[in-house]
């Protein structure tokens, strides 16, 4: 199997054109932090709480006290840690860009990525999610389940984030809409079939997957 076949097969099964619905780029940035180590349903509850208090913007978050933010995002788990990270991100954008995050995300992509990674609590997956979905930049998100899927299907035997990302970006056209769809389709596959304990029957990659072929021997 190659990446083109995988992309097409997954597209036939999973329709995920509006993968990260949000009302603003900043909402996506906050969501990328909230989704660390939790399910998306919990993130939606935290986002709804923030919206109900009208604080889902840089200036309001800078002015908001930590205790109030922590209370709003309790559903997302690790609320003290995540509140600190969200406040740190808002303070950074306020200080360096006068609250205009578009300026930061519009920088050359490698420069913008390095800058995001310099902010406490933002790792590679979070930074790349921000670049791809908030900045609409061609940066593939090589999350851990991508490694699992690639290894099982025989695409690439690696757990190294950078190696997986470079591999995909060397083959797939650098278009954010394609990277976004590919990533979201892989997420759906990981949730429905390619779990830690795989459910191979009915998987859209069942007949091309190296793992499934070995299992059938």
Image: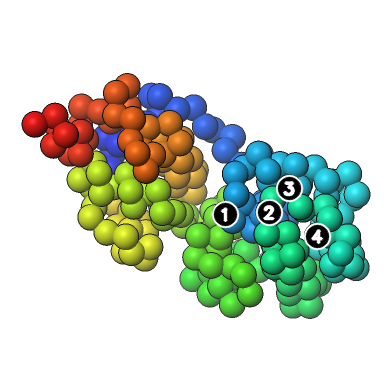
- The reply to whether discs 2 and 3 touch (Cβ–Cβ < 8 Å) is yes
Crowding at mark 3 (Cα within 10 Å: few <14, some 14-19, many 20+): many
Q: Is residue 99 left or right of residue 37?
A: right
- Give the CA distance from mark 3 to mark 4: 10 Å
Q: Is residue 163 above or below residue 201?
A: below
Question: What residue is drawn where x is 91% and y is 49%?
Answer: 53
Which element is circle 2 on?
loop
Q: Earlier in the sequence, mark 1 or mark 2?
A: 1
Res 70 label: 4
- Give the CA distance from mark 4 to mark 1: 16 Å
Q: Earlier in the sequence, mark 2 or mark 4?
A: 4
Q: Earlier in the sequence, mark 3 or mark 4?
A: 4
- Give the CA distance from mark 1 to mark 2: 8 Å
Question: What residue is drawn where x is 17% and y is 39%?
Answer: 210
| Residue hosting label 1 | 37
Res 77 label: 2
Q: Quadrant of the N terminus?
A: top left
Q: Quadrant of the C terminus?
A: top left
Q: Is residue 22 visible?
A: no
- Give the CA distance from mark 2 to mark 4: 10 Å
> What colour scheme was applied to this rendering of the protein?
rainbow
Q: Is residue 68 above or below residue 4?
A: below
């Amino acid at each position: 199997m190659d990446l083109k076949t995988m992309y097409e097969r997954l597209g036939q099964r999973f329709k995920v054109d509006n993968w990260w619905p949000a009302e603003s780029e900043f909402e996506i940035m906050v969501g990328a932090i909230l989704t660390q180590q939790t399910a998306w349903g919990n993130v939606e509850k935290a986002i709804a709480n923030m919206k109900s208090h009208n604080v889902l913007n840089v200036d309001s978050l800078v002015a908001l006290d930590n205790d109030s933010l922590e209370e709003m995002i309790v559903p997302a788990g690790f609320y003290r840690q995540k509140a600190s990270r969200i406040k740190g991100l808002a303070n950074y954008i306020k200080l360096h860009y006068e609250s205009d995050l578009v300026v930061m995300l519009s920088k050359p992509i490698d420069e913008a990525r390095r800058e995001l990674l310099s902010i406490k609590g933002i790792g590679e997956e979070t930074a790349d999610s921000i670049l791809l979905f908030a900045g609409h930049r061609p940066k593939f998100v090589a999350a851990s389940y991508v490694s699992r899927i690639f290894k099982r299907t025989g695409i690439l035997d690696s757990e190294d984030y950078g190696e997986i990302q470079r591999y995909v970006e060397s083959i797939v056209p650098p278009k954010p809409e394609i990277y976004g769809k590919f990533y979201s389709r892989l997420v759906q596959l990981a949730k429905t079939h390619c779990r830690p304990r795989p459910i191979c029957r009915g998987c859209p990659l069942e007949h091309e997957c190296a793992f499934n072929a070995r299992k059938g021997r």
